[in-house]
Image (cartoon, grey):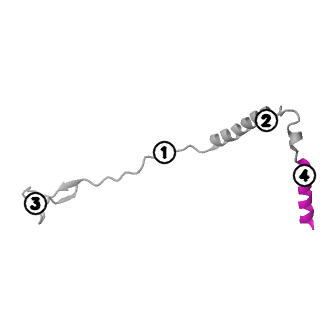
Amino acid sequence: MNKILAIAALAGLVLVGATSQASAWHRGCWGCGPAIIGGAIVGGAIVGGAIVAAPPVVVAPAPVYVAPAQCPVTDQFGRVVVDQFGRQVYRPC
């Protein structure tokens, strides 16, 4: 019962508060300009406050993969070692 009463009251307020087209343009809408300017000021204040209150954005450089340095493998006499296919053998420095 209470829900039905609340819905009926809300519907009544909406119907009473609704304006017809004739009453909306009764005075040539002289209040439209100040309303738009006021809305822009209030909206700008809200957005500006949100920007000021936001934490600073820290941009870190992207991680870059760097392969470890490779040094040629040498034998005991200082000669470069090659594998069975003739390629130089490398090891991490």
Query: Can you tell which of label 2 and label 1 is closer to the viewer?
Result: 2
Residue picked out by circle 4: 15
Q: Amino acid at mark 4?
A: Leu
Residue, far bottom: 1
- Going 56% across and 43% down the picture, which residue do you hit? 56
Viewer-nearest of discs 3 and 2 = 2
Label 1, label 4: how far apart the Cα atoms are: 53 Å
Is residue 27 or residue 46 the one in the foreground?
27
Characterize the local packing of mark 1: few (<14), some (14-19) or many (20 or more) Cα atoms within 10 angstroms. Answer: few
Mark 1 highlights which residue? Answer: 59
Q: Real-space Cα distance between discs 4 and 2?
A: 23 Å
Count of numbered circles in the view = 4
Read off the residue under disc 3.
75
Residue at horizontal 78 percent and vertical 32 percent from the top = 33
Q: Tag 2: residue type?
A: Ala
Q: Are marks 4 and 3 in contact (CB under 8 Å)?
A: no
Q: Is residue 50 above or below residue 12?
A: above
**Amino acid at the residue labelled 1:** Val
- Label 1 or label 3, whichever lies nearer to me, is 1
Q: Is residue 37 left or right of residue 69?
A: right
Quadrant holding the C terminus:
bottom left
Question: Mark 3 or mark 1, which is nearer the start of the sequence?
Answer: 1
Which range is magenta? 1-17
Taking the spot 83% from the left edge, 34% from the top edge, the residue there is: 29
Q: Are marks 3 and 2 in contact (CB under 8 Å)?
A: no
- Callout 3: SS: loop
Of the 4 image quadrants, the one containing the N terminus is bottom right
Q: What residue did someone put label 2 on?
A: 35
Question: Could you tell me what secondary structure mostly forms the magenta stretch?
Answer: helix
At x 84%, y 32%, the residue is 28
In the picture provided, is 60 more to the left or to the right than 56?
Answer: left
Cα–Cα span, label 1 and label 3:
47 Å
